[in-house]
């Protein structure tokens, strides 16, 4: 899998300070099934926002980025509201924290600080876990306004982290996956209308213009789930995480970058089997 691709840019040396006049609205805690590195990969990947969090964000346009930070114009969902904001995210790896600031637009002035704490191995389950504690700070004229805004953030973050946890789980599992190596002439068992099995491995099954194809279930970009992924107007498989498209003929990705999805045209042998 590849890391999020950010334009070359300078690292940040200036940690954004929290303005004195902000009020603390609320705080949110959660234990993530993720290493600290998994969290960094997730938060530095700005491009997943309108795809993985499509009920919250409609679009994102990267304005500037560098090592461990990005700044982007984000359109709030639904796009018909025409509400945007300029978000900036800065990571401080040394102190295991990152801050998201709203520089302009909806929620301008918000300062959201997230502190990470790796869970000790003796306490964690079989895999690595990380505790996060999020503090929401923003301008608020009164206590009532602060409380209302705080409730809104808690609801939003519970949803965003549910979605991010699912993404991180798949992304980390994809790191351990070997590429599929199809055996010429091999036969694969059909499990259901969208799934076949090659030995221990499950693959996607998709029909395009009367032809059948099998493909890997994990996107070679960052591990997005391709089971039952849609085909676009050109018959390419669309990954739901960043909307990269893959040709079923040769696995090539429309974004280049050497990404290749394992896929093959197959022939139906009978109701239970296809042949490579
Ligand atoms: S994981 Fe990024 S496009 Fe699939």
Image (tube, helix red, strand yellow):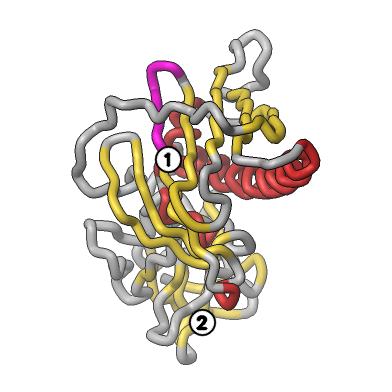
Q: Residue at coordinates 42% horizontally, 40% vertically from top-left?
A: 89
* Residue 218 visible: no
Q: Quadrant of residue 257?
A: bottom left
- Mark 1 element type: strand
Residue 62 at x, y percent in the picture: 34, 56
Decide if residue 271 is in sight here: yes
Residue at which label 1 appears: 89
The quarter of the picture where the N terminus appears is top left
- Would you place residue 16 above or below residue 180 in this image? above
* Image quarter in which the C terminus is found: bottom left
Residue 85: x and y in percent read 48, 57
The picture quadrant where one finds residue 69 is top left
Q: Please indicate whether residue 28 sits to the left or right of residue 96 in the image.
A: right
Badge 1: few (under 14), some or many (20 or more) residues near its Cα, within 10 Å?
many
> Is ligand 1 closer than 8 angstroms to the Cβ of mark 2?
no
Please give the label number shown on residue 191.
Answer: none
Q: In whole angstroms, how far apart are the C-alphas of marks 1 and 2?
A: 41 Å
Q: Judge by depth and name the residue closer to the eye, 132 or 89.
A: 89
- SS class of the residue under badge 2? strand
Dot 2, crowdedness within 10 Å: few (<14), some or many (≥20)?
some
Q: Percent position (x, y) of residue 203?
A: 52, 61
Query: Given the current orientation, which residue lies at the most extreme right position?
Result: 144
- Start-end of magenta stretch: 89-95
């Amino acid at each position: 899998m590849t890391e999020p691709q950010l334009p070359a840019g300078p690292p940040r040396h200036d940690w954004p300070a929290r303005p004195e006049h902000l009020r603390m609205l609320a705080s949110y805690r959660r234990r993530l099934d993720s290493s600290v590195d998994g969290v960094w990969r997730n938060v530095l990947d700005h491009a997943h926002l309108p795809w993985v969090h499509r009920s919250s964000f409609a679009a994102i346009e990267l304005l500037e980025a560098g090592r461990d930070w990005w700044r982007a114009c984000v359109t709030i969902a639904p796009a018909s509201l025409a509400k945007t904001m300029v978000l900036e995210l800065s990571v401080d790896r040394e102190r295991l924290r990152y801050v998201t600031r709203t520089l302009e637009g909806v929620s301008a002035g918000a300062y959201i600080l997230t502190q990470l704490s790796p869970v000790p191995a003796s306490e964690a389950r079989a895999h690595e876990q990380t505790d996060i504690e999020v503090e929401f700070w923003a301008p608020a004229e009164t206590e009532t306004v602060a409380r209302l805004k705080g409730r809104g953030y808690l609801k939003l973050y519970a949803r965003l982290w549910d979605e991010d946890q699912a993404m991180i789980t798949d992304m980390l599992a994809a790191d351990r996956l070997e590429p599929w190596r199809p055996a010429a002439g091999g036969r694969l068992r059909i499990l259901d209308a969208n799934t076949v099995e090659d030995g221990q491995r499950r693959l996607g099954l998709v029909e395009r213009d009367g032809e059948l194809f099998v493909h890997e279930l994990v996107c070679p970009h960052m591990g997005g789930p391709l089971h039952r992924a849609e085909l676009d107007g050109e018959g390419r498989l669309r990954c739901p995480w960043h909307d990269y498209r893959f040709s079923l003929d040769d696995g090539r990705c429309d974004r280049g970058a050497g990404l290749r999805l394992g896929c093959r045209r197959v022939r139906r042998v009978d109701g239970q089997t296809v042949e490579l």
